[in-house]
Image: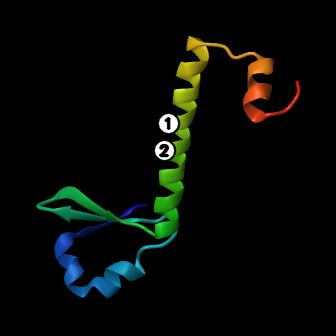
Amino acid sequence: MPTILPISDLRNYTVVLDQVDVSKPVYLTRNGRGTYVISKIDDYDREATVETLIREIDKGERTASDATVSITDIAQKLGVSP
């Protein structure tokens, strides 16, 4: 179950930060609406890496359907023999 707190609880931020844990962010609300998320840096880094990976896979899938490259061309670019 997510931890949801009003933003006014940040007056005592140490209590709020103590509730943040890996894979357990704290959601802050303003006027009853979700506004901010506080999470561990490890979670943030992992999510950023996943987003980058998804973008690169998508880019690769789009370019793979546009053109093909022969093994000889790849070998030449890498400076090895096929």
In front of the other: 28 or 77: 77
Query: In the image, is 44 to the left or to the right of 5?
Result: right
Q: Residue at x 52, y 66 (%)?
A: 42
Whether 71 is drawn above or below 37: the answer is above
Residue drawn at (26%, 61%) of the image: 36
When asked about the image quadrant of residue 66, the answer is top right
In the image, residue 8 above or below residue 29? below
C-alpha distance separating marks 1 and 2? 6 Å
Percent position of residue 63, x then y: 56, 20
Quadrant of the image occupied by residue 25? bottom left
Q: Is residue 9 above or below residue 44?
A: below
Residue sitting nearer the eye, 65 or 50: 65
Neighbour class for label 2 at 10 Å: few (<14), some, many (≥20)?
few
Given residues 70 and 24, the one toward you in this image is 70
Mark number, residue 51: 2
Q: Which residue is mark 1?
A: 55
Disc 2 is placed on an element classified as helix
Would you say 81 lies left or right of 59 here? right
Q: Is residue 35 above or below residue 63?
A: below
Q: Position of residue 70 (x, y in %)?
A: 75, 15
Task: Give residue 77's position: percent from left, percent from top.
Answer: 72, 30
Please, what is the three-letter code of the amino acid marked with disc 1? Arg
- The amino acid sitting under disc 2 is Glu
Circle 1/circle 2 CB separation < 8 Å: yes
Asked which secondary structure carries label 1, the reply is helix
